Image (cartoon, helix red, strand yellow):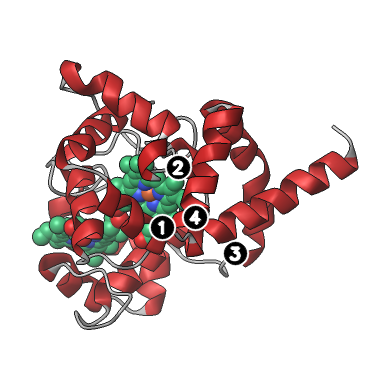
Amino acid sequence: MTASAIHSITAACALAARAAVTAGATTARAITARVVTTGAVAAAAAVVACCPPALAQGKLPAADPGKGQQIVGGVCSACHGGDGNSTVNQFPKIAGQPTEYIVKQLTDLAKPANDKSARVNAVMGAFAATLSADDRRNVAAYLSAQKPKPGVARVKETLDLGQRIFRAGIPERGVPACAGCHGPAGAGIPIQYPRLSGQWAEYTTSQLVAFRDGTRRNQLAMTQIGARLSDPEMKAVADYVAGLH
Ligand code: HEC
Ligand code: HEC
């Protein structure tokens, strides 16, 4: 690949990343059209290939994973497991999520319920509020370095629908392909796109509902995507990504 080709892909990715954050209806449709016409996997691979170096510049200063491990072992492990691999389907697996994503969630969960960019959850909000800024960075450093345990898809009948939504979106309703931002295998793309693969389907569904209902209002593109998915579509894509690896 020539230097100018790389430059134009990087520029396109920077645009796509920005569009992802501010995506209006038109942008979401444009992303969909691009992913559908060029092939979901190829487009997603292009995003994976070019976004990390462009975004890595926003790196946080060094954190202390040892201190993070102490907090997780003492406070968080009851729900999330000692290594961030929760064994209960309503508590998310956090192992291997990007550091910056974890810090952002803990920050948004700690915001008061009337904050416009809060992620409102009574249980987790209370725990997040006990953490200092350094605690957040330390637990994030520890959890992001843990190996995520794979999950399984359980509902055979909806696998095709889930796969179609994940790879191609629902173009006629302006739902972009999940793979375009979360990666072709759902592994996430640091810094802001979380891993979906292997996650508990019940938790994934609950988040899509929370984005739609506005209790989780910390990301505009996901709010719009949640609003355009029906309950059966949410369940289908959540079950599909649970088994993806
Ligand atoms: C009593 C159970 C419980 C405990 C203890 C707990 N959490 Fe949570 N955690 C939850 C629940 C429930 C959610 C999902 C919240 C929602 O639906 O928005 C969550 C969500 C999260 C998320 C967001 C994950 C994602 O994929 O977006 C992070 C990060 C997190 N917890 C970290 C922690 C840390 C760090 C601690 C310890 C300081 C902790 N949790 C303690 C129940 C718990
Ligand atoms: C335009 C980019 C984009 C697209 C397309 C996209 N997502 Fe997301 N998604 C994000 C971002 C960014 C976040 C992190 C939100 C935050 O910072 O709180 C996210 C978060 C999520 C979460 C929460 C994960 C967790 O651990 O709590 C789920 C679930 C999710 N997306 C599912 C989907 C599904 C299903 C699709 C396809 C129908 C999809 N996303 C398409 C950008 C996108």
Give the residue pinned by disc 1.
221
- For the point 27% across and 38% down, the residue is 199
Q: Determine the CA span between mark 3 and mark 1.
A: 23 Å
Q: Determine the CA span between mark 2 and mark 1.
A: 12 Å
- Answer few, some or many: residues within 10 Å of disc 2's Cα (few below 14, many 20 plus, some between 14 and 19): many
Which-is-in-front pick, marks 4 and 1?
4
Asked whether disc 2 touches disc 1, contact meaning CB atoms under 8 Å apart, the reply is no
Left or right side of 6 for 196:
left
Q: Quadrant of residue 106?
A: bottom left
Q: Amino acid at mark 4?
A: Thr
Give the residue pinned by disc 4.
26
Give the residue pinned by disc 2.
182
Q: Is residue 117 among the parts visible in the rendering? A: yes
Residue furthest to the top in view is 156
Ligand 2 within 8 Å of the CB at mark 3: no
- For the point 59% across and 39% down, the residue is 48
